C-alpha cells in the first residue's frame, strides 16, 4: 500500500476525543499518525449551530492535508453529521483541481449518523428530543440521562469507561446538513451489531439509503454496543486499518 493516511477522529456528543484513546493507541502502534478533534459544542459556551464544530474538523484535516498527506476521517454518532459537512472542498479530488496535494481520502463511520442534505439530527429523532435528553433550563445544552451500563454494556474493564459527561450544545442538533460528504468520498460504515443507542436496523437503513443515492459505502461489522472504541478497540483499529488500505485477515 502507499503511505499511510493520517487518522482524524471526530467524537459524538458528550464525551470528547478521549473516547478514542484505546483505539488510537493501537493505530499509533501500527505506524499511523492520529489526532482527535475536540468539538466546540462540548465547550463551556453553548453554540447556536454546528458551524464551529465543522470548522474545527476542517482545520484539523487541513493541518495534515497541507503537508501533502491523505486523511482518513473517523466519525462517531453525532460526529457523522458534522464530519460529513466538513468534507466540502477538502477531499483529494477537489484539492487536486486546485493544484494541491493531500486531502481527505476516506470517511469511516462507526455507529454514526449518515444523513442526506437538508436533514438534521432532531429530524432523525422525529422532531422531538428523545425522552432520555436532559435539557438545561435555558434549553441551550443537553446531557444524556442514560445509565452508563446501557451503552457500555459490553465493556469488561469498567475502569476504561469515560466518567466525564460534558453538556452538549443542543442547538447543533437543529442545524441543517448542507453537504453530504459521503456522496463524494469513498466510505466505510462499521456496523455495531449490539448497539443499544443506534440500532443495527437503523444503521443498515442509513447505509442502504446512501447507496440508493449513489454513494460508495462499504460495510464491516463488530459485535459491539454504541462505544466500540472503548469496548472493542483492537477490532475497531483493525477495521480502520483495512479501510486505510491494509490487507488484514479477520480474526
Image (tube, rainbow, N blue to C red):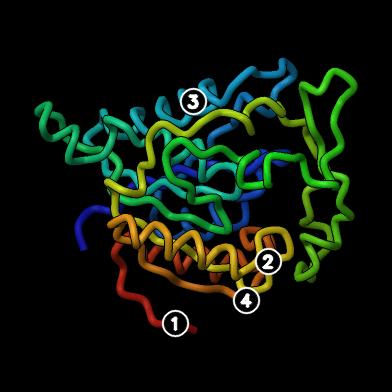
Q: Quadrant of the N terminus?
A: bottom left
Horizontal side, residue 125 vs residue 104: left or right: right
Question: Disc 2 marks which residue?
Answer: 195
Question: Disc 3 marks which residue?
Answer: 56
Q: Earlier in the sequence, mark 4 or mark 3?
A: 3
Question: Disc 4 marks which residue?
Answer: 223
How far is disc 4 from disc 3 in space, using C-alphas? 31 Å
Q: Which residue is pictured at 53% across the width and 68% down the height?
A: 191
Pointer 2 with pointer 4, Cβ within 8 A: no
Q: Which residue is pictured at 38% across the width and 35% down the height?
A: 179
How far is disc 3 from disc 2 in space, using C-alphas? 28 Å
Q: Earlier in the sequence, mark 2 or mark 4?
A: 2
x%, y% of residue 135?
Answer: 85, 31
- Mark 2 residue element: loop
Q: Earlier in the sequence, mark 4 or mark 1?
A: 4
Residue 250 tag number? 1
How far is disc 2 from disc 4 in space, using C-alphas? 9 Å
Q: Nearer the viewer, mark 3 or mark 1?
A: 3
How far is disc 4 from disc 1 in space, using C-alphas? 13 Å
Q: Earlier in the sequence, mark 3 or mark 2?
A: 3
How far is disc 3 from disc 1 in space, using C-alphas? 34 Å
Pointer 4 with pointer 3, Cβ within 8 A: no
Q: Earlier in the sequence, mark 1 or mark 2?
A: 2
Q: Earlier in the sequence, mark 3 or mark 1?
A: 3
Which is more toward the observer, 109 or 170?
A: 170
Is the residue 203 above or below the residue 45 in the image?
below
x%, y% of residue 200?
Answer: 61, 69
Amino acid at each position: 500500500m502507499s503511505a499511510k493516511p493520517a487518522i482524524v477522529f471526530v467524537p459524538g456528543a458528550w464525551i470528547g476525543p478521549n473516547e478514542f484513546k484505546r483505539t488510537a493507541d493501537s493505530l499509533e502502534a501500527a505506524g499511523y499518525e492520529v489526532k482527535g478533534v475536540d468539538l466546540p459544542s462540548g465547550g463551556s459556551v453553548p453554540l447556536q449551530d454546528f458551524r464551529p464544530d465543522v470548522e474545527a474538523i476542517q482545520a484539523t484535516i487541513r493541518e495534515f492535508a497541507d503537508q501533502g498527506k491523505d486523511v482518513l476521517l473517523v466519525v462517531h454518532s453525532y460526529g457523522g453529521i458534522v464530519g460529513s459537512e466538513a468534507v466540502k472542498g477538502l477531499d483529494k479530488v477537489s484539492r487536486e483541481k486546485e493544484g494541491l496535494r493531500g486531502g481527505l481520502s476516506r470517511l469511516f463511520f462507526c455507529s454514526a449518523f449518515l444523513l442526506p442534505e437538508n436533514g438534521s439530527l432532531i429530524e432523525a429523532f422525529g422532531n422531538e428530543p428523545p425522552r432520555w435528553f436532559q435539557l438545561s433550563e435555558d434549553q441551550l445544552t443537553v446531557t444524556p440521562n442514560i445509565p452508563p451500563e446501557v451503552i457500555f454494556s459490553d465493556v469488561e474493564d469498567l475502569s476504561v469507561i469515560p466518567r466525564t459527561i460534558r453538556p452538549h450544545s443542543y442547538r447543533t442538533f437543529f442545524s441543517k446538513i448542507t453537504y453530504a460528504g459521503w456522496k463524494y468520498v469513498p466510505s466505510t460504515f462499521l456496523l455495531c451489531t449490539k448497539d443499544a443507542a443506534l440500532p443495527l436496523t437503523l444503521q443498515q437503513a442509513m447505509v442502504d439509503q446512501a447507496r440508493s443515492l449513489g454513494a460508495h459505502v462499504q460495510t464491516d461489522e463488530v459485535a459491539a454496543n454504541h462505544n466500540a472504541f472503548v469496548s472493542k478497540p483492537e477490532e475497531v483499529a483493525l477495521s480502520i486499518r483495512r479501510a486505510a488500505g491494509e490487507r488484514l485477515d479477520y480474526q
